[in-house]
Image: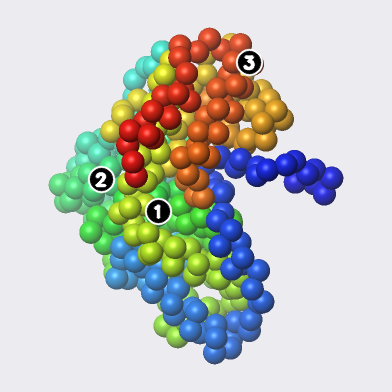
Amino acid sequence: MLTLDFHPTGNHFLQIPGPSPVPDRILRALSLPTIDHRGPEFGALGLKLTQGIKRIFKTQHPVMIYPASGTGAWEAALVNLLSPGDHIVMYETGQFAHLWSRLAGRLGLSTEILEWKGSDTELPEAPGWRHGVQAALIQERLEADKEHRIKAVCVVHNETSTGVTSDIPAVRKAIDAAKHPALLVVDSISGLASADFRHDEWGVDCTISGSQKGLMLPPGLSFNALSPRAIEASKTAKLPKSYWAWDEIIEMNKTGYFPYTPATNLLYGLHEALEMIEAETLDKIFARHKRWSAGVRGAVEAWGLPVQCADKDLHSPILTSIIVPKGIDADKLRKSILERFDLSLGAGLGKIKGRTFRIGHLGNSNDLTLLATLAGCEMGLKLAGVNLAGRGVDAAMEYFAAHPA
Ligand SMILES: *Cc1c(COP(=O)(O)O)cnc(C)c1O
């Protein structure tokens, strides 16, 4: 929509679950002059960032910063950890888990998919896409793998296509209970800096993340947080790797530099984001997203529409996905809301295309932008002829007013 002849008044509402709305402070930081990435100023910036980002992942170990989207960091993790033909277990919680397993297959890995089995009347197309990872299934599978053929277990922390989170410590416990040496690899591309995440304490071997979700940056940076075991594994892993290879980056990062030209201006943005996050504190940020999520979920319940996440305790703090009534095309609904009210919502992805839409409650949002978002949805739903049980916006207003931040 952002063509040069498109000038709507007011701000566009970018309420998709990533890219999230970018604070003006970060946009201004991005516009600083580009500097020499081999010069002294850059080294100081690089050192600050490679240290600062560790505090967001809650790790003492190296974090790789790539000039790539999250998908690049998925690939980086797998090529550094694994060898051709290695067998890995991946848990399908939604479209992102599915795309990651497709990428793993293309790299020459042997993938085995675990998923929730059952039926669902509201979303028969994808019953498993309403649930989080069942750690017991992983434990059972690992216990059966007596020869330790499985090299890694891959799970998504916050499944952005469904609005369901997974219990990562429970997955760690399952691997330990099975006394299995598989590496734990976690996609927290949309979870990091919005939902509680503790790389070291939770015993994750490699955490993958990206810039355009909780870090409130534009797309273009992504991350691999490592464990000592991951670094060890990378020394013998045989999948071809060059650009993504951790060893050279770890070495160069010690002095604040990178083996190649880094995305200098995005790194200015990361610097600003780290300052904002540390000033607010991660705990307050997590509480803020939970509160938004409760308000938005309450609105959807007041409309009488099913939230895709079937387990309230696993409802994502970052986004809410809503199942539309049969006969309504969620993509047409989103299109009309965009055209009428300049509000972008997330689409139902993959096998639930047209069956759901998603509201992002992350990034540079606040109570009133979320109320406006809900108002846009409520008007759009009514215009599409959906019979709503009640007023979602009113429910959210009451929730936000009664629950001060
Ligand atoms: C956004 C996202 C991705 C994909 O990242 P890109 O930046 O689009 O490459 C992968 N996994 C999850 C959970 C995501 O939210």
The residue wearing badge 3 is: 384
Residue sitting at x 61%, y 22%: 380
Q: Residue 391 in the image: state x and y as whole percent.
A: 47, 18
User: Residue at left 61%, top 19%?
Assistant: 329
Q: Is residue 254 above or below residue 329?
A: below
| Residue 124 picture location, percent across and down | 45, 17
Q: How many marks?
A: 3
Marks 2 and 3, how far apart in space? Answer: 42 Å
Ligand 1 contact, mark 1 (Cβ < 8 Å): no
Residue sitting nearer the eye, 397 or 212: 397
Residue count near mark 3 (Cα–Cα under 10 Å), binned few <14, some 14–19, many ≥20: some
Task: Give the quarter of the image for residue 64.
Answer: bottom left
Q: What residue type is labelled 3?
A: Ala
Q: What element carries label 1?
A: loop
- The mark found on residue 171 in the picture is 2
340 on left or right of 232: right
Residue drawn at the location 51% of the way across and 84% of the way down: 43
Question: Residue 36 at what x, y percent from top left?
Answer: 63, 84
- Say which label, 1 or 3, has the lower sequence index: 1
